[in-house]
Amino acid sequence: MEKLKIVPCHIGIIMDGNGRWAEKRNLPRIFGHKEGIEAVRRTVKAANKYNIKYLTLYSFSTENWKRPKEEIEFLFSLMEKKLREEGENLHKNNVRVRFIGRIQELPPNLIEIIDYVEILTKRNTGLNLIFAINYGGRTEIIDGIKEIIKSGHSEKEINEELLSKFLYLPDVPDPDLIIRTSGEKRISNFLLWQSAYSEFYFTKVLWPDFDEKEFLKALLDYQRRKRKFGAI
Ligand code: IPE
Ligand code: IPE
Ligand code: MG
């Protein structure tokens, strides 16, 4: 079997297909979200194993507010519960947990545990595990521009480097690889600015079925890519 020699520094995942996973089994959609947590667990483990430095998981988009209230509430309470259960464990594993998105618009109970886990794991030096919650790429750029204006920068000072510094996590490198499950081939407002030169990997596997084997497939596919960044 092909050997893994080059791994991406930053992987972003659009975790899609929970609803369809449940529908296939004649179950309500929320069962797909529940099962999706197991895929998150497997993926974090695999990312650790293969020495990935940054893993960004798209968990709730700014457009997901269009879903039924019950589904949204379920998702937020599931996130809260799992963060409460897993926070200490992630900390023990030297994982630094971070969040991007308009966190301030989330329910107070969820914000509370987000803040707690972020502070708890702040000094950890292992995997950077980033949850994108109430995240939208366009919103992130708008928020950045607002901050630039507030801080009094002039038109002349505005360039790519400056805007990058005003995005949610300026110290995190752009994603090298973006994986999307469930067969959809679109970006759905994920890391728009940062994905300018990312490699994309699409798989038909539904998110709750995603595992280390699928993760490794994506890594092997990635190492066969020739990245050019506009050069020859
Ligand atoms: C992804 O699965 C999870 C979230 C967007 C929160 P979906 O819920 O979008 O599943 P499908 O696309 O309906 O199958
Ligand atoms: C993208 O999935 C958002 C997340 C995975 C959190 P969606 O299921 O919301 O995307 P669309 O609506 O199919 O583009
Ligand atoms: Mg979907």
Image (cartoon, helix red, strand yellow):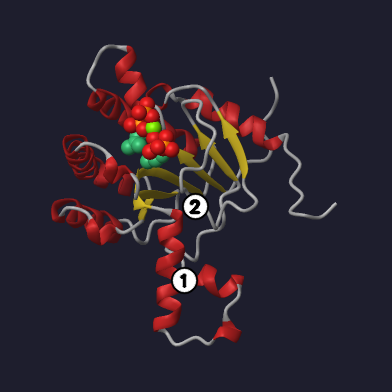
Q: Which one is nearer the viewer's eye here, 1 or 174?
A: 174
Q: Quadrant of residue 143?
A: bottom left
The location of residue 126, given as percent across then percent down, is: 45, 50
Categorize mark 2 by other alpha carbons within 10 Å: few (<14), some (14-19), many (20+): many
Q: Secondary structure at mark 1?
A: loop
* Residue at 55%, 75% in the rendered image: 162
Measured Cα–Cα span from mark 2 to mark 1: 14 Å
Residue 15 visible somewhere in the drawing: no
Please name whichever residue, 45 or 208, is drawn nearer the observer in this view of the structure. 208
**Which of marks 1 and 2 precedes in the sequence?**
1
List the single residue furthest toward the front. Answer: 66
x 40%, y 50%: residue: 130
Q: Is residue 80 visible?
A: yes
Q: Position of residue 155 (x, y in %)?
A: 56, 84
Count of marks placed on residues: 2
Residue on which the image places disc 1: 166
Image-based side of 196 in relation to 49, left or right: right
The crowd level at tag 1 (other Cα within 10 Å; few <14, some 14-19, many 20+) is some
The picture places residue 210, in percent across and down from the top left corner, at: 44, 25
Query: Helix or strand or loop: what does disc 2 sit on?
Result: loop
* Drawn side of residue 66 relative to residue 202, left or right: left
- Image quadrant in which you'd find residue 57: top left
Three-letter amino acid code at disc 2? Leu
Determine the residue positioned at 50% across, 30% down. Answer: 184
Q: Which residue is mark 2?
A: 191
Name the disc covering residue 216, or none: none
Q: Is residue 30 left or right of residue 55?
A: left
